[in-house]
Image (tube, helix red, strand yellow):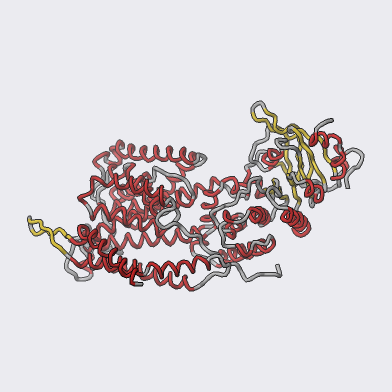
């Protein structure tokens, strides 16, 4: 799919369709530290796009800039052609860009189902009087929300623990719940920040399958930060490599695997 | 079994010894003579209750243990809902009948307790559910009280007309304060709200022309029953009073009982609204915000509006209770709205268990009724409060009756979806 000869120019010859997410010249400075330095990439519809790089390369900072948790120092971010630069994070989430966190952020003292209900907040009947008098409209909305929650719980295999407190789940279950919680908002783009961290090999394989399923069945694009190379290389359509905040390579898994700059960044020089 | 029986006897005996000074001795006033009179019945009742509770402790634990296990099964059990409903109805009926059987003083204390129940429930939403530490809660209580006092004395509006206005005023005050300060978290928010509480009190003290300053506002009318006043004679020309309408002998106790019942209805209303709210999306969002604000934002929840709604709702509850407080007292001045009131309400919430409504109700009753019953220990009241809170934080930080999570029934699986 990608231009083979020059990976960094791949964007220009990419499909005619407008990319779902366009990141242009993104920079983020914390005082004297330039954590993200002119990062630029596109994520297309239906694509699984991975961002990799050594620890401290600025991957999560890129996520935080895209998701509106940081206000980038310069650059633009377009979702579906519209600028989301500088919008508050909850606004960006409503536009269909949701994320998971490197250290799972669940509502720990609430049950698994409640976690999934909260994330449907924006789709629910939130008007006060409707809920106060349990109007039929309100009840229908709640019933549908539970229905959707049940659907996703089955999907990520958590139905049996539906009424347990989220904080008491095993780590792998928490990771899956966080993904379900994102998916239930019906996003266009799902950003996963190190989803395989702390998972055992079997769980990682399940995650691989789950991400592929999500893409196939729910028409989403996935933007992924990951250190597990077997997962990244197997699943990604395109990989973007960063080091010290700067982009060093972009291309298909095969290109990245053989790219001397990437090898240098990971293994050092002779 | 004999061991349990023996233990229960011992515990009941201890309870008897401990309750004699509080329940067994009553002060009798006859003219100018004050005497103490022993009454064994309450002590015996207390002993019997303690005995039964101790005896049945093991079976009860077994039952709750079973329930604990079934909690993990995704299918909900329907039976407890019915039990709960019956229990709730029984408690309400008992609370409504109770004032007709006891002394006027006891009903009066119960009314005061209900005011604190309302305040506690309101603050519970802010602190317990939304996790916003508000140390100036009394400010909204003052807004409600002064709102009613001023509206009724200046514009002649009745209590029932003023009630919604007071709720609105308090809610608006809450939102006005909330808007600039809710971006603060934890300790910082606590300090700002603490300051706000003091500002309101100082304003009331110094706006002499409007609020009467330290002299306060007097002659605040009491609520009426569909226009029927509770007084010896009607205050308006040609008006009818309650006892005239029903052809009863005038009795001052009627007023007290009526006020109690009004407070009870108001408390039940608040309870109903809160119980609906916490099961609604907005209530869930409050809790989610307490758990993790960043996760909330990442899911499209706007933290500012959610915080404001919690803060505004808590404030409006305080305004609601404040209007009733003014009507019950008939006289208010800034001394009723000092920081210590905020502290007591917060103590109620912490003691009861943050987010637990039954816990908050029981704590409110305990913290208001006990000092009234044991007046001779009045000087030690704050000392004991402090001690209890410290001990609570060490041994039971989740409160006396910690909140339990609602179980949600999932629809019978839809493989078709």
- Horizontal placement of A246 versus A105: left or right? right
Expressed as whole percent of the image width and height from the top left, the position of residue A209 reads 76, 57
Image quadrant occupied by the N terminus of chain B: bottom left
Q: Outermost residue toward the top? A: A32
Please tell me which residue lies in front, B415 or A131.
Answer: B415
Expressed as whole percent of the image width and height from the top left, the position of residue A110 reads 54, 56
Total tally of numbered discs in the picture: 0
Please tell me which residue lies in front, B306 or B403.
Answer: B403
User: Can residue B168 be spotted in the picture?
Assistant: no
- Horizontal placement of A14 versus B201: left or right? right
Image quadrant occupied by the C terminus of chain B: bottom right
Q: Residue at x 76, y 38 (%)?
A: A53
Expressed as whole percent of the image width and height from the top left, the position of residue B160 reads 34, 58
Q: Is residue B50 above or below residue A30?
A: below
Please tell me which residue lies in front, B117 or B243.
Answer: B117
Q: Residue at x 31, y 66 (%)?
A: B7
Asked which quadrant contains residue A118, the reply is bottom right
User: Can residue B68 be spotted in the picture?
Assistant: yes
Asked which quadrant contains residue B106, the reply is bottom left
Q: Residue at x 45, y 70 (%)?
A: B63
- Horizontal placement of B139 versus A17: left or right? left
Expressed as whole percent of the image width and height from the top left, the position of residue A174 reads 63, 54
- Horizontal placement of A221 versus A67: left or right? right
């Amino acid at each position: 799919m990608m231009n083979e000869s020059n990976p960094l120019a791949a964007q220009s010859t990419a499909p005619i369709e407008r990319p779902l997410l366009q990141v242009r010249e993104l920079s983020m400075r914390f005082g004297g530290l330039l954590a993200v330095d002119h990062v630029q990439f596109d994520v297309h519809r239906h694509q699984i796009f991975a961002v990799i790089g050594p620890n401290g390369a600025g991957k999560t900072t890129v996520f935080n800039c895209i998701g509106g948790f940081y206000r980038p120092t310069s650059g633009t971010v377009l979702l579906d052609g519209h600028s989301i630069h500088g919008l508050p994070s909850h606004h960006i989430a409503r536009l269909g860009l949701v994320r998971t966190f490197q250290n799972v952020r669940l509502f720990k003292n609430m049950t698994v189902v409640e976690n999934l209900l909260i994330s449907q907040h924006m789709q629910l009947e939130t008007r006060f009087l409707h809920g106060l008098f349990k109007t039929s409209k309100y009840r229908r909305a709640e019933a549908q929300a539970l229905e959707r929650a049940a659907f996703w719980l089955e999907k990520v295999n958590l139905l049996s623990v539906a009424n347990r407190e989220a904080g008491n789940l095993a780590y792998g279950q928490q990771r899956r719940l966080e993904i379900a919680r994102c998916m239930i908002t019906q996003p266009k783009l799902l950003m996963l920040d190190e989803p395989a961290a702390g998972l055992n090999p079997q769980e990682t394989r399940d995650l691989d399958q789950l991400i592929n399923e999500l893409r196939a069945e729910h028409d989403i694009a996935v933007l992924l930060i990951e250190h597990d190379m077997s997962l990244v290389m197997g699943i990604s359509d395109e990989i973007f490599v960063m080091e010290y905040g700067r982009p060093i390579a972009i291309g298909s898994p095969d290109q990245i695997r053989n790219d001397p700059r990437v090898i240098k960044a990971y293994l050092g020089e002779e | 079994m004999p061991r349990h029986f023996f233990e229960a006897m011992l515990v009941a005996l201890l309870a008897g010894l401990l309750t004699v000074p509080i329940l067994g001795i009553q002060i009798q006033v006859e003219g100018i003579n004050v005497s103490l009179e022993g009454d064994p019945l309450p002590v015996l009742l207390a002993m019997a209750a303690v005995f039964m509770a101790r005896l049945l402790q093991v079976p009860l634990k077994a039952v709750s243990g079973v329930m604990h296990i079934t909690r993990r099964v995704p299918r909900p059990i329907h039976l407890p809902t019915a039990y709960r409903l019956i229990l709730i109805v029984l408690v309400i009926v008992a609370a409504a009948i109770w004032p007709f059987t006891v002394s006027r003083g006891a009903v009066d204390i119960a009314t005061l307790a209900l005011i604190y129940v309302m305040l506690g429930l309101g603050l519970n939403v802010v602190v317990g559910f939304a996790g916003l530490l508000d140390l100036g809660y009394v400010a909204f209580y003052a807004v409600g009280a002064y709102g009613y006092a001023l509206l009724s004395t200046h514009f002649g509006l009745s209590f029932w007309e003023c009630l919604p206005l007071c709720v609105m005023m308090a809610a608006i005050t809450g939102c006005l304060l909330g808007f600039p300060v809710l971006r603060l978290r934890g300790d910082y928010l606590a300090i700002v709200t603490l300051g706000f509480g003091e500002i309101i009190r100082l304003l009331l003290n110094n706006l002499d022309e409007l609020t009467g300053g330290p002299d306060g506002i007097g002659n605040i009318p009491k609520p009426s029953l569909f226009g029927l006043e509770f007084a010896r004679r009607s205050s308006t020309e040609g008006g009818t009073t309650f006892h005239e309408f029903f052809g009863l002998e005038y009795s001052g106790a009627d007023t007290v009982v009526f006020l109690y019942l009004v407070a009870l209805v108001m408390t039940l209303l608040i309870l109903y609204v809160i119980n609906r709210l916490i099961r609604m999306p907005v209530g869930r969002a409050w809790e989610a915000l307490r758990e993790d604000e960043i996760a909330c934002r990442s899911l499209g929840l706007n933290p500012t509006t959610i915080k404001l709604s919690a803060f505004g709702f808590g404030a409006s509850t305080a305004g609601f209770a404040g209007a009733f407080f003014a009507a019950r007292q008939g006289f208010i001045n800034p001394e009723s709205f000092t920081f210590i009131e905020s502290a007591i309400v917060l103590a109620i919430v912490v003691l009861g268990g943050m987010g637990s409504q039954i816990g908050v109700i029981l704590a409110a009753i305990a913290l208001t009724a006990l000092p009234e019953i044991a007046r001779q220990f009045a000087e030690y009241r704050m000392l004991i409060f402090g001690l209890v809170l410290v001990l609570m934080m060490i041994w039971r930080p989740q409160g006396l009756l910690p909140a339990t999570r609602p179980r949600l029934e999932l629809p019978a699986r839809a493989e078709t979806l």
